[in-house]
Image: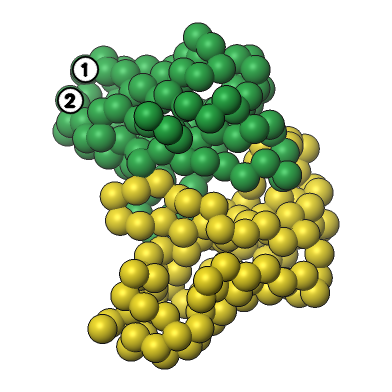
Chain colours: A yellow, B green
């Protein structure tokens, strides 16, 4: 069964303290992996799409990487405004539908000043 | 306005009420979606419309009824809901269906069923 697991469930960091969020997936074939950011009281906001192992994407303090089993979202020198819940989703070849994504439950990131 | 707009932002309804959620997208996208988000659970896809045609109904109970009058507007009609239906309901749109089109979400309607 296709599955996406995000860890940790919550992460508290001091401002400037770099770390990584993990998204591990078990799917029969990967079409794409997505990262979204969700602020309290708002809908998820698209960050990155990764398609194949070894691919990397960057945006400001965020860098997403992909292997055959997992993806990492690296946060370098985070600021309080990076506090949010980060969601990972996978598009699997095994899904009959083009519309079905397998979502993780998210990692809540809190950056303390 | 730009992006995806959802109204109302908050809704409290009794189990016997009938209400509707509204979603409007100003992005010129062809696909629209309803998702349910419950605390600490993954997003659940409910319905998908592509060029105004419903293409996915993810085994959603009949007390939820979607309507898509055109490619910019999407409604979710609610009736005789249960307390476990309390959640954040998110509308999203994408240029087309498929993994090459990222989803653009509205800010959701927080629904409480009493």
Q: Which residue is mark 1?
A: B17
Indicate the quadrant where residue B52 lies. top right
Percent x, y for residue B114? Answer: 17, 33
In what element is the residue under mark 2?
loop
Mark 1 chain: B
Percent x, y for residue A60? Answer: 53, 71
Residue A2 visible (yes or no): no
Residue at 50 percent across and 83 percent down: it is A76
Task: Please tell me which residue lies in front, B94 or B43.
Answer: B94
Judged left or right of residue A111, residue B45 is right
Label pair 2/1, CB-CB below 8 angstroms: yes
Marks 2 and 1, Cα distance to the nearest angstrom? 5 Å
Can you say which quadrant of the picture contains the C terminus of chain A? bottom left
Q: Which residue is mark 2?
A: B14
Judged left or right of residue A100, residue A36 is left
Indicate the quadrant where residue A1 lies. bottom right
Task: Please tell me which residue lies in front, A61 or B87.
Answer: A61
């Amino acid at each position: 069964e296709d599955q996406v697991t995000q860890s940790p469930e919550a992460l508290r960091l001091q401002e400037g303290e770099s770390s990584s969020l993990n998204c591990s997936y078990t799917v029969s074939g990967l079409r794409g992996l997505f990262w979204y950011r969700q602020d309290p009281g708002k809908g998820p906001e698209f960050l990155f799409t990764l398609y194949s192992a070894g691919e990397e994407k960057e945006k400001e303090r965020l860098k997403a990487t992909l292997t055959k089993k997992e993806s990492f979202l690296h946060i370098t020198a985070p600021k309080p405004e990076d506090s949010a819940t980060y969601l990972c989703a996978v598009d699997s070849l095994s899904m009959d539908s083009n519309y079905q994504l397998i979502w993780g439950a998210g990692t809540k990131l809190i950056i303390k000043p | 306005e730009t992006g995806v707009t959802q109204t109302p932002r908050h809704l409290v309804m009794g189990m016997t009420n009938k209400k509707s959620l509204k979603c409007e997208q100003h992005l010129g996208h062809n696909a629209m979606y309803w998702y349910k988000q419950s605390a600490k659970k993954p997003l659940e896809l409910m319905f998908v419309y592509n060029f105004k045609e419903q293409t996915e109904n993810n085994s959603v109970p009949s007390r939820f009824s979607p309507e898509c009058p055109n490619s910019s507007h999407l409604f979710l009609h609610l009736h005789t809901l249960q307390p476990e239906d309390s959640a954040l309901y998110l509308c999203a749109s994408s240029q087309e269906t498929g993994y090459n089109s990222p989803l653009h979400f509205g800010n959701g309607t927080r629904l409480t069923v009493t």
